[in-house]
Amino acid sequence: MGLIENLKTYSEESNLSEDKKELFNSFLSKGFPTNKDEEWKYTSLKKIVASDYNLNSNASDIDNNTIKKYSLGVKDKIVFLDGKLIYYPEIKGVKIFDYSEFECRNDDALNELNSALANNGYNLVVEKNIVVEHPIEVLFFNTTENGFSQYRNKIDIGENSEIKLVEKIQDLSNSSTLENHFTQINCDKNTKVEFNKIQNNTKESKLINCMNIYQEKDSTCEVNTLIFGGSFVRNNLNFEQNGSNCESNMNGISLLDGNQLADNHTFVDHKTAHCRSNEMYKGIYLGDSKGVFNGKIMVRKDAQKIDAFQSNNNLLLSESSTIDSKPQLEIYADDVKCSHGCTIGQLDEEALFYMRSRGIGVEEAKAVLTYAFASEVIEKITVPEIQFLTKKLIASKLNVDLDFSL
Amino acid sequence: MLKIKNLKVGIEDNQILKGINLEVNAGEIHAIMGPNGSGKSTLSSIIAGKEEYEVEEGSIDFDGEDLLELDPEERAHKGVFLSFQYPIEIPGISVSNFIKTSLTEKRKALGLNSLPTKDLLKMMREKMELLSIKKGYLSRNMNEGFSGGEKKRNEIFQMAMLEPKLAILDETDSGLDIDALKIVANGVNKLRSENNATVIITHYQRLLDHIVPDFVHVLYDGKIIKSGGKELALELEEKGYDWITKQSEE
């Protein structure tokens, strides 16, 4: 049958409103994107959507130990289980609600599918003048075998407020699952947001994660994307700057092996003058893994004095791993500073010998150099628990017993 | 400790070492001198285990073991240390992280537990003092942006931490000003014991004013053409390499 048929059956069984029916039909008329679509040229959904998925999720339980096992160990957690919001913290100045509908401006097929059929997610509102002291972790657990699930989340940050978030999707069914997430962040004036994505799901899990961020004057928003697990990950990260003195920062580490594929698509829309964006994505590829990076920077006509920087550096550590990297600059203003750089390389043989001569074994030396390559990104993360976890994941993925500390 | 017998080494079709014989015992300091291109650095690289060279003939025995059969890291675990002529920069790894990793891996290979961080830091501070290394240095990235002198001092610092049986100092004196040279020499002298040995590879006599060798060997065109006591270095300084190479050619 395939996912389209599963979705049709599901939509007929659901009591969709007229608006949603319209969205769903629009999705159907477009269908899932294919390699003919420029934005999906190097990443194929064909096999993924040819499989059947279970759209009716389990009603199951989860014990605290399981939550603890996959949690970062931070105090405040929002926990979802098979779509249901089962836990959220009480924090002064922060309101957390279950899913409520909202519209987004994207009209691509996957977003339409999400807005038509998603009925789970959270809405987090930070009031004005609140500095949320501790990072909040959002955990999405799935126990539904071969489940297809969608979440639709909205985060509103009030003026002069600050928050740090961590998002993690965890499959517990150990089957071939697909998730389609959409998250919108509205950053009001003079806000500061750090959003971390830890994408280290099970072997056969697949993820499409779209994030839209709207920034007002004097706001800074940083998104760190850390990809270690899952067979397929596609991230669409879109920033829109709507006021002066905005800063948008994106950092990423992809460390892949086997047949993993990770695709990071970023888009920064500089609509106003005197703003900045910084992008630093590092990819490390082993086995038959594949990376895709597509970074687009748009500077609109009146957006003068923009300072935009983008880099995508890659290490290919095996014969058969690949990376497709595509920077795109579209500049319509005449007084801007924009640059981009892309590198593809291997580990430095001289450095490997140097380390081996100091007693560090080959695999450990390679791991240290790989860590060194990624460390620039790790340093950007301000939550120590995430830094620690990232180091641990690098070591475990490279099969070495090192902690990269001191 | 180290016995090199009739060692012939080449790279691609060039023979660089043409039959080296050298014996170094515990407690000794040897200096190997020679003009540029005589094979000094090849000799040190081959002892440390660099892979692009081809050993055509001969053997290197280290404490009764065939050194040429061992990987570079195994040689380090057994106590061989090479101070690089051109130390490598590794951005993203702090000096302390690097040294901790190499010490931990060495201890692991020897069946020892890793040192508690507290003890490790204490040891680092002691060795830093020995080499007049300033605070803040440990958190700098490995050799990144270091001056020539700082890089060489960093090599000796690692040597002090790893406590090798056999240390080979490859042109450690080049790029050092006289103050740094004295500090490095002082460090090497203090680390000296009856149980370890040092091979100093150098072009100049200068370092040997501060680290007094027991033996001096002159390497020329892939062969040791003359060996003697410390006075040989002075003679070389005075008369130049020509004096001895002419003798050898005759």
Image (cartoon, coloured by chain):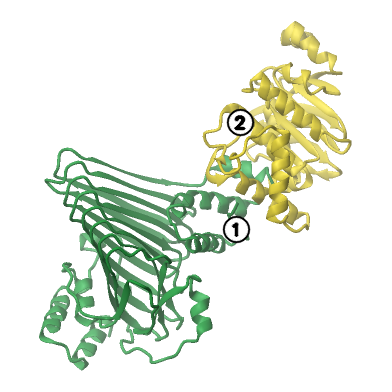
Chain colours: A green, B yellow
Residue under label 2, please give it.
Answer: B150
Specify whether residue A182 is in view: yes
**Which residue: 35% across, 88% down?**
A57
Q: Are marks 2 and 1 on the same chain?
A: no
* Relative side of B156 to A140, left or right: right
Residue at 77% from the left image edge and 21% from the top image edge: B210
Using the image as rendered, state which of residue A43 and residue B111 is in the foreground: B111
The quadrant holding residue A81 is bottom left
Q: Amino acid at mark 2?
A: Glu
Rendered view: A193 above or below A278: below
Dot label at residue A104 = none
Chain ID of residue with mark 1: A
Secondary structure type for disc 2? helix
Above or below, A284 relative to A92: above
Q: Is residue A173 left or right of residue B151?
A: left
Question: Is residue B17 at all visible to an observer of this figure?
Answer: no
Give the labeled residue for mark 1.
A403
Relative to B21, does residue A179 appear above or below in the rendering? below
Viewer-proximal residue among B212 and B127: B127
Q: Quadrant of the N terminus of chain B?
A: top right
Q: Residue at x 51, y 71 (%)?
A: A73
Q: CA distance from mark 2 to mark 1?
A: 27 Å
Q: How many residues crowd mark 1 within 10 Å: few (<14), some (14–19), many (20+)? A: some
| Horizontal relation, residue A131 to residue B17: left or right | left
**Viewer-closest of A266 and B24:** A266
Label 2, residues with CA under 10 Å away: few <14, some 14-19, many ≥20: some
> Hey, what amino acid is under mark 1?
Asp
Chain at tag 2: B
